[in-house]
Image: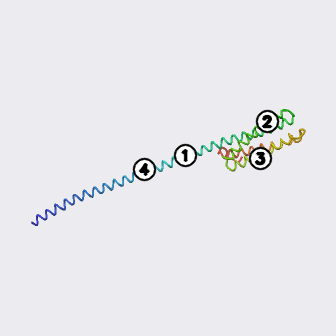
Amino acid sequence: MGDTWGAVAVAVVGVVGTLGGALLTQSRADRTKRLELEAMAQQRDAERRHTEQVRQAEHAEVRQREFLDLRRACYISLNTASRQYLTAQVNLQHALRVGAGVEACLEQLETRRTTHRDSYAEAQMVAPTPVLAAAGAVSRHLNHGYGRLRQLLAAPSADLEAVDAFDDQVNSSWALLSEMRHTMRRDLGVDDSEH
């Protein structure tokens, strides 16, 4: 009977070993599968985060490019309007010198003044401080010139000496316009020099 029990014990140990091995193998397979799934989920999350970061970077780049385009258009408009405003002042100065065409030049000056005012108002919304400072100096100087011309027009007769003295105003206006243009170009990254 001792041999029978020994055989039964060996058989039981064999069956338990076989079942235990199968269970251990299944447990390891389940653990490996779970680790693979977790790794895949982490990889998907990392890819999703990377995709979102790339999308946000592209969106920021597009917005920055659109804002640069907006500033460029604004600067072109303001530069053009400022130059035309000054040109209209020079035209009125010449008309006062020769005593002809004053009304037409005055009408053109009023139109250019309004256009400049509108362009400057737009720049106040999009231009950074250095550009706005230069544009403000130009605007104040041009408006001062406008006031001087209106005073000359209000005088009973054109004082040619006062009309000729307006040349200083024109020259300083051109210098301020040049400074404004350089500041705008630096802001747009077109001109990195200090002029």
Counting residues from the start of the chain, the first of labels 2 and 3 encountered is 2
Distance (Cα) linking label 4 and label 2: 68 Å
Residue kind at label 2, given as amino acid type: Glu
**Is 178 above or below relative to 36?**
above
Judging from the image, what secondary structure is the residue with disc 4 in?
Answer: helix
Q: Which of the 4 image quadrants contains residue 143?
A: top right
Distance (Cα) linking label 2 and label 1: 46 Å
Q: Residue at label 4?
A: 44
Counting residues from the start of the chain, the first of labels 3 and 1 encountered is 1
**Res 107 label:** 2
Q: Which of the 4 image quadrants contains residue 162?
A: top right
Residue placed at 55% from the left, 46% from the top?
A: 59
Q: What is the x, y in percent for residue 25?
A: 27, 56
Dot 3 and dot 1 residues touching (CB under 8 Å): no
**Res 140 label:** 3
* Left/right of residue 93 with respect to residue 49 in the rendered view: right
**Res 59 label:** 1
Residue placed at 86% from the left, 41% from the top?
A: 154
Q: How crowded is mark 1: few (under 14 residues within 10 Å), some or many (20 or more)?
A: few
Dot 3 and dot 4 residues touching (CB under 8 Å): no
Dot 2 and dot 1 residues touching (CB under 8 Å): no
Counting residues from the start of the chain, the first of labels 1 and 4 encountered is 4
Of tags 3 and 4, which is closer to the observer? Answer: 3
